[in-house]
Amino acid sequence: MRLIRNTLLSATMLMGVGVTQAHAQDVDVTATDKGDEIVVTATRRATSLQDAPINISALSAQELSKQRIDDAKGLAAFTPGLTVAETGPRTAGTIIMRGISSSDAGNGANSNSAVGVYLGEVPLYLDFKLLDINRVEVLQGPQGTLYGLGTLSGAIRYMPNRPDSSDWSIDAHMRAFGQSQSKDAGVNGDVTVNVPIVQDHIAFRSVVGYYDNPGFIDYNYLLKQPGVSNPQPVRGTTAAQAGLGTAAQQAANFYSKKDLNYERTFTTRNQLLLELNPGAKLYLTYAHQQTKTGGAQTVQAGVLGTGRYESAKRYQEPSTRTSDLFAAEANVSLGFAQVVATSAWTKQTTDTFGDQTDLLLDLNYGYEQFPNYSAYTQSNNRTKQFNAELRLVSSHGGPFSWVVGGFYNNLRTGSNGKEVLPGYVAWYNATRAGTIVASTGLPRPPINRPDDLEYISFVNTQTKEKAVYGEGTFSITDKWQVTGGVRYFKYDAFAEGGTDTPLTASGQIRTPYPLAQIIPSRVRSGSTAADGFVWKANTSYKFSEDLMTYFTYSKGYRTGNVNRVAPCIIPLPAGQNVCALPSELAYQPDKTRNIELGVRASLFDKRLQMTGSVFHVKWTGLQVPSRTVNGAVGITVNGSSAVSKGVEFTTRIKVTPNLSLQGNYSYTDAYLTADAPGLVVSQGKSYGAFAGDRLPGSSKHAGSAQVTYTQPLANGNEIEANWAVTYKGDVYSRIGLRGNGEVIPAYTTHRAAITYRAEHFDLGIYADNIFNKYATTGISNDISSFNQVRNGIVERYYGRNILAPRRVGVDFRFRY
């Protein structure tokens, strides 16, 4: 019963795109972090990073390896304007760019549609590990014309290495580490193999990886026998009077599981290259990943005396997320243009189990009269997506170049959920059934639901989007270019769902035991649709080979949709209802408009490289999280308007041939520009938000700095030492701190590594979070539920995500 945001979080392994004159898919983009130029293709034209006329950051494969960046959560520290909170393996994390977020800074979602994430060209919903990646390109600001839906605030492109039909290669990597607060060591390993099958025509490339990362959150109050064990042996009118009982009571009722927020991930990506000739290539890709964990990276802030790395939850909270991808990309040269055709089919299934006791307490159904009351929830969420894109990219040369294309996306989601109250029915029938109801004078009937099923639901949705786009660039002189682009989009969304409450009298009639299905009369549906245009204008001027400035006006959009909640039956039936009213069923698109001025400079024979920009983003029709009136189910609604403005800066300084410095800094001021009555919901109460209220989820100030020293050795090898410090400023957990929001404090972390590098292998030691900083990274629910007592039971609803403690390990890589 939590908000599930339909969004983009990851994408295909498809390789490259066509470009003017030099086709991006044919360009060798290998680059290092030692001063060599990184070649990027985000503009559909291969160009060096310093010559790109847009705000784009890039991390090379060497930088990803050096900083041990395995997924999107690791990118934020080294990319200005990017925020991805560390929320643990149970979710993929919410990606925020330039402060464009209205969601609570909580446990994170498995995706976030304000930022498009790609691996290659096709937007997908998957979160594959960053293995065998050539580089990561981060495009700050709306990218609505070329990249389309979901690029409201920017896009991230993971560009994998390609099959090579000319030579064999192998890359094997292993990392082992110990972690503070964990009893077991962690081990990560991956192997990449490139196999040329037919010289210059057929090649196969495969990467396989496994991550066994220990947890550090202990679940010490798990119920031995739900419905029989007492979750809180000592009830009280205040939290101070209540407790978890004596040592004997705890031993009788609870058992412990240590380090339950572990991660175990298996991942593989496989690609076959079929090359008829240099002008006709086909890439076929299959990828699979499964991530398992036993609990959340969340603590309850000391409720009932729990510790800093201790959960107060009554149940284990396992999650299994399984993703599959099938993709194809064809690149064909027509002489005057390059045809790029891509298609992909993806599937993701997520199964979760969690403690639902406190939510039902909040809904005040009276279940807590049962002395051993507790509840759990199980859910199954499914995502299937097919998308296809056909693009034509000019290659005829001359001062004018262009890109035109069409895009189609068909997204289907499904979810099933249930809630169970172990032992409740047996207690009710023994103590309540047959007693007289004072208001009616009639005896209470027994409940015929021995499985204790309290709630069931299903929701199925489908969203189809079609778009056409075009972008053209005219080089007025060798130094001055102008670019313009436009995109037309249209989408339709449909939802169908139903709920029932089998413990209520009418629910027992609708869903008599042993049925656990929803009758057709309880099923409702709804739909929404919209279309529109977004456009872009850009110009850049090169004062010299080492100094360029650019200006961009761009728009981005995010499609509306139907909320994944069963529509209400109108008029509302008597008793419990968990559903969406007509006004809660759907939400509309939101849009951004970005104005940006930037400069790129390479000075002193490229020993000093700098990139800086100032931006102003106007956001209208905000999509914000809310809850239904009936059942407090998470939904999305349209809110007010907002603005985000700030500065982003990166630099690289080569002090000597052996000593280099790197740094980045971002200032982001994101806030509402109009009042929004009733925008924030807490404890069933609506709170207004007002113009000037700061947006949640991202820091005003953030940045990193690192120093790298390389010592060449007489044998031709080298020793590299690196130290990096990252700073994340304070974050608001909720818009304007309205509705019991709070400030998440700023924190600083340090990491370091010393690595011996040889021709065919690297061997290093490293440490992350060197000073073992304890920090909060997110908030679930809000502070009003902390130590809240309902009928003698202390709620354990409030939670804080926390930073992973210190890691110290060894890292080995072999390549040939």
Image (tube, rainbow, N blue to C red):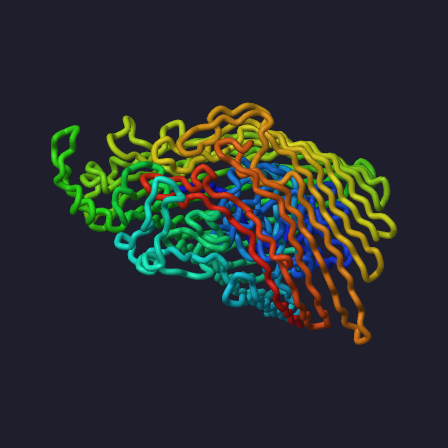
Given residues 734 and 319, the one toward you in this image is 734
Q: Would you say 663 lies left or right of 299 here?
A: right
Q: Is residue 759 visible?
A: yes
Task: Give the x, y percent position of residue 215.
Answer: 49, 60
Residue 440 x %, y %? 14, 29
Measured along the vertical axis of the image, is residue 239 above or below residue 806?
above
Specify the farthest residue to the right: 604
**561 lies above or below 110:** above
Residue 149 visible in rendering: no
Horizontal and vertical percent position of residue 296: 46, 52
- Closer to the camera in the image, 121 or 361: 361
Q: For this view, does 616 lie left or right of residue 119?
A: right
- Report x, y in % for residue 570: 29, 27
Pick the quarter of the image with the N terminus.
top left
Query: Relative to 729, is 749 above or below?
Result: below
Q: Quadrant of residue 400?
A: top right
- Residue closer to the observer: 667 or 624: 667
The residue sitting at 29% across, 42% down in the picture is 368
User: At 38% from the left edge and 36% from the top edge, which residue is drawn?
Assistant: 632
Quarter of the image with the C terminus is bottom right
Q: Is residue 519 above or below residue 324?
A: above
For residue 521, side relative to residue 718 (left or right): left
